[in-house]
Amino acid sequence: MIAGFITASGILIAASQLKHILGVPAGGSNLVAIAGSLIRNLPATHPWTLAIGLSAMAFLFWVRRGLKPLLVGLGLRPRLADTLAKAGPIIAVAVTIALSSALSLEERGVRIVGAVPQGLPPFALPGLDLELLGRLLVPAILISVIGFVESVSVASTLAAKRRQRIDPDQELVGLGAANLASAVSAGYPVTGGFARSVVNFDAGAETPAAGAFTAVGIAFATLFLTPLLFFLPQATLAATIIVAVLSLVDLGVLKRTWTYAKADFAAVAATILLTLGAGVEIGVTTGVLVSLVLHLYRTSRPHLAVVGRVPGSEHFRNVLRHEVETDPAVLSLRVDESLYFANARYLEDRLYDMVAARPELRHVVLMCPAVNAIDASALESLEEINRRLADSGVTFHLSEVKGPVMDRLQRVDFLDHLTGRVFLSQHQAMTELSGAHRARSDRATAK
């Protein structure tokens, strides 16, 4: 879901900036609306704005790939060359500001940033209007969820590029603190934005200190440098954002997930299509719901394998995949999922079908190496399995039960009523149960 959200958001952000590259009015909250607006206004494309936007984009794309090798080839040290290459957006901003001022591009119809208010916002507590709070409650919750998902998504993606990991709890605490500060300083809701984060990443930010330096830099610029931004073409800003966010677009995830798991492909595709077609809120909500439904579907039908002993070893493997030894009187069944309300009935039905097809069966051993939890509904199912197997003259056993699961089973009387035993390993279970069965058969034959 996160992969689809990032890709769709990157496309949406890039598309929303095209109006500044073309110099036309356009808008929309999804790709269909944005594309339609751009197409309708395409005849009004402003040549000067288009030239600046395309030139800035071409320069920035070249800087990302070609400037560092060029500087290294000229004899600069790789680290210095890398630093200069990451300063590409600054160069683009400085050059286009100079051109805009020298050529009076504003008079030629090029949209510029214009006057930016100087100074920092005043600190003040927000007004407490109960009616306003009531109207904003639901939108505020939605903004919070979308902001957190966006922040974690872009943080995870950028961390992966450096083989790092993030702590979502810390991200949530940081966002909360930032939004509290924003509330008393006339700020917008705070989130880890895609465009800003990627621009910061491309500039070489590696530690939290980068955020502190950015804040100091923004404060300094707000106090003293805003007059210098007056002539900055909006097309240059748009080009910087487009080049940055397109690095997050990964349509290859569709092919990879289709090849690996169709269910994951469905989650990715649904998130991408609905985010692009209906907007971020619907796309993220649908992606989460699809992921939950797919998780419930997969775990409600866990993989169950009848296993046997690999000859000459203590290992047990699926009888459909390996040449193994089995005993017709013992059914060894491995469940590869934790047991909970969604899959408890499925386990019962499959187990009863297997038992019914084996009239010579005397023991059932449920292997639990992959069972990390058993909830109350699944416990009731195990109790019912134990009772019904006992009525059929079949003994029910467990093997390889994990410690935390065993601790919970010992809190109730399930083990007291278990007709069989809990074996430490499947090898021990098969050795004892098969040996006991052979001994009884030998005695019956002697009589």
Image (spheres, grey):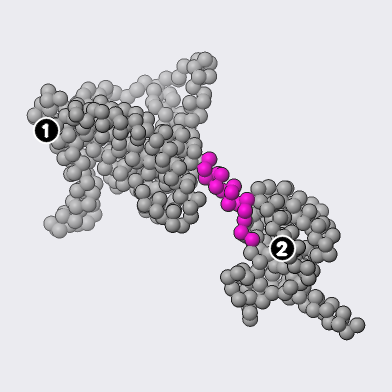
Label 1: state its secondary structure.
helix
Q: Is residue 105 above or below residue 67?
A: above
Three-letter amino acid code at the position of disc 1: Leu
- Residue at the (83%, 62%) spot, across then down: 392
Q: Going by the picture, which residue comes out furthest to the left?
A: 103
What amino acid is at disc 2?
Met
Helix, strand or loop for the magenta stretch, by majority: helix
Does the magenta run of residues contain 290?
A: yes
Residue 180, visible in the rendered structure: yes
The part of the chain drawn in magenta is 289-304
Looking at the rendered structure, the number of numbered marks drawn on it comes to: 2
Answer left or right for 10 relative to 139: left
Image position, residue 5 (x, y; %): 42, 42
Quadrant location of the C terminus in the rendered image: bottom right
Q: Which residue is mark 1?
A: 99
Residue at which label 2 appears: 354
Tell me which residue sits at (52%, 45%) in the image. 291
Secondary structure of the residue carrying tag 2 is helix
* Side (left or right) of 276 relative to 59: right
Q: Residue at x 59, y 47 (%)?
A: 296
* Residue located 44% across and 41% down the image: 271
Q: Residue 274: x and y, percent?
A: 43, 38
Residue nearest the observer in this picture, 410 or 4: 4
Residue 101: % across, % down: 12, 28
Q: Is residue 176 above or below residue 79?
A: above
59 shown above or below 24: below
Q: Which quadrant of the structure image shows residue 116?
A: top left
**Residue in the foreground of this view, choosing between 80 and 254:** 254
